[in-house]
Amino acid sequence: MSKVSIIVPVYNTSSKLHKCLDSLVNQTIKDIEIIIVNDGSTDNCEQVVNEFKIKYNNIIKYYYKINEGVAKARNFGIKKANSDYIFFVDSDDYIDTRLIERVMPYINENVDLIKFKLQRVDEYEKILEKVDGPCFEKITGQEAFNKLYCKDVLIDSPCVYIIKKELFTENNFKFNGTYHEDFGLIPLVIVSAKSVVSIPDCLYSYIQSTNSLMRNDNYDKTLKKMDDVLFHYDNAIETMKKMNLEKKTQENLKIYYTNAIVLKLRDLQTKDKKIYIFFRRNLKWQLKLRLTDSDVLDVLHSDRCSAQRVMKLLLSTTLQAQRCLLIY
């Protein structure tokens, strides 16, 4: 049995898929299986995969399914994985050919979760940014989260972790939603780990395309993204309550999720800028949202005044109605 299952959800990325798969099949350590989940692509992705399967049929497993989004594609890949460890790679990115070699010593030590660094590159492989974050030797998942949550902007990206599969299966963790599927889940995966290491090697390359920078979502899509953020927030908070976590970790998770939800909503493009500005001002004014104050967070998550309720009101009503709802 291979040591690592590399799960690659694929959807209409045929122009970049060759480079992605090339970086996987040329790993210096071949103790891997590559699980490609074609999520209903309508381009030439299957043709690209077949070219690789001819030569690497012993390590490539290919599945085609109807289009349901990256979350369900990842869950499908987890079910098909036969290795003790799983690793998620987006089909329009690529990895260092030494990645598995670099993490293998920690896999052999049975570490639950291994984190490494990522770089952002353009379509010509020019490095735009190397994303930094804390490095540390083996500590518990809760200790790791408390180190990472305020110092690592990629904490919720599954692509910078090699993860023991049992963290998903034993805790019944699944990716959900259409957008921001990593936001609610990955921090919970981290705190559930018994052991975590974070190494300084930059091993994952995220391709930042011109199209992604210029993308302008329509209004309905923006509202769906907001709904998904709120769903992940609610689900994460409820799941956290069922876990045996230290008080410090619970408080830091609440701070992380509250910060993240505001930042994610801030980054969304809205049809009416006045609604957006009003939402931001009133959220902070009405809830007195000092994001590092645990006393305020206790109020924030109480039945009397929850952030998600206020946000849902703001998103589902007109600007005039919003004013009325928030004045009292």
Image (cartoon, rainbow, N blue to C red):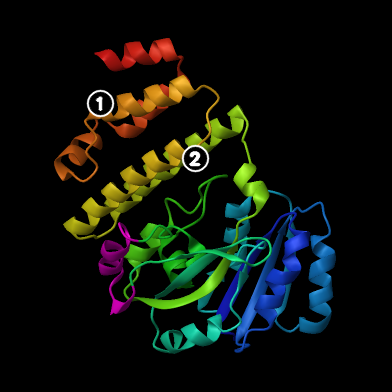
Q: Residue at x 77, y 54 (%)?
A: 41
Q: Secondary structure at mark 1?
A: helix
Q: Is residue 194 above or below residue 70?
A: below
Q: State if disc 1 and disc 2 touch (CB < 8 Å).
A: no
Is residue 161 something that shows in the picture? no
In the figure, is residue 55 to the left or right of 275? right
Q: Secondary structure at mark 2?
A: helix
Q: Amino acid at mark 1?
A: Trp
Q: Which segment is the magenta one?
A: 135-151
Q: Nearer the viewer, residue 245 or 275?
A: 275
Q: Tell me if mark 1 has few (under 14), some (14-19) or many (20+) residues whose alpha carbon lies within 10 angstroms of its own.
A: few
- 141 in magenta: yes
Q: Residue at x 63, y 84 (%)?
A: 27
Q: Which residue is mark 2?
A: 228
Question: Mark 2 or mark 1, which is nearer to you?
Answer: 1
Location of residue 262 by image quarter: top left
